Image: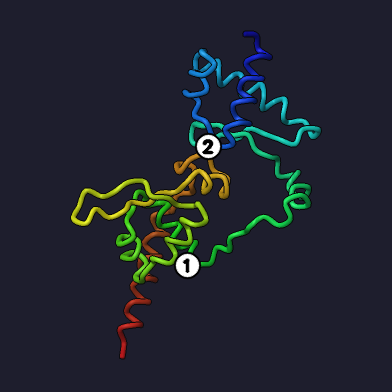
Amino acid sequence: MNAEEYEAAVEAILFTMGESVELAKLAEALEISEEETRDVIERLCTRYESDACGIQIIELDGAFQMCTKVSQYEHLIRIAKQPKKYQLTDVLLETLSIVAYKQPVTRVEIEKIRGVSCEHAVNRLVECNLIQEVGRLDAPGRPILFGTTEEFLRCFGVQSIEDLPSLDPDQVEEFKTEAQEEVDQKLLP
């Protein structure tokens, strides 16, 4: 196959799959190396950079997905009416951040950090496809372990969990102090 045929093949695979496809799987399907496959994807990405093109290829944690450019969103809304939006409350964001930074994590561990029940928040985040079951803890009762999804990466514009901002150790200590003060105030008669 020539370069254009490889590009057409990658385009067809990503369009048809509708979700991200790992680089290794793309290379296997094309019967070329991962490096050559990445070159094909980069050529497609360059072609899609034009304002005359409404699609793009994004990388998500070592996998690639074809999606619509944000600049075309307004036109999509006219066709699809209003897509379902999820309202992320402070409780949901707090729970989501715990999962993102501590994953894999159990519901009990999240509740220990938050200090309150989080069953509803976890269920809503699963419903929004921002977190998912990633396994079971090898402990009595085999509790479910949760982690973030590719949808989480897309929504927050990061390629992998390693791209999340890190907290300054001084900030962590400040947060711990504030949390302890809140607990102390609640214990006062």
Residue 1 higher or lower than 169, as above or below: above
| Neighbourhood count class around disc 2 (C-alpha, 10 Å): few under 14, some 14–19, many 20 upward | many
Q: Amino acid at mark 1?
A: Val
Q: Secondary structure at mark 2?
A: strand
Q: Amino acid at mark 2?
A: Leu
Nearest the camera: 1 or 100?
1
Kindly identify the residue that appears in the image at 70 percent across and 40 percent down. 69
Mark 1, residue position: 91
Kindly identify the residue that appears in the image at 59 percent across and 36 percent down. 18
Kindly identify the residue that appears in the image at 49 percent across and 31 percent down. 62
Q: Is residue 52 left or right of residue 131?
A: right
Mark 2, residue position: 60
| Quadrant of residue 180 within the rendered picture | bottom left
Q: Is residue 155 left or right of residue 68?
A: left
Position of residue 87 measured from the top left corner of the image (x, y, whole percent): 58, 63
Position of residue 99 measured from the top left corner of the image (x, y, whole percent): 40, 54
Residue 125 higher or lower than 117, as above or below: above
Q: Is residue 26 left or right of residue 117?
A: right
Position of residue 105 measured from the top left corner of the image (x, y, whole percent): 33, 53
1 and 2 marks in contact (CB < 8 Å)? no
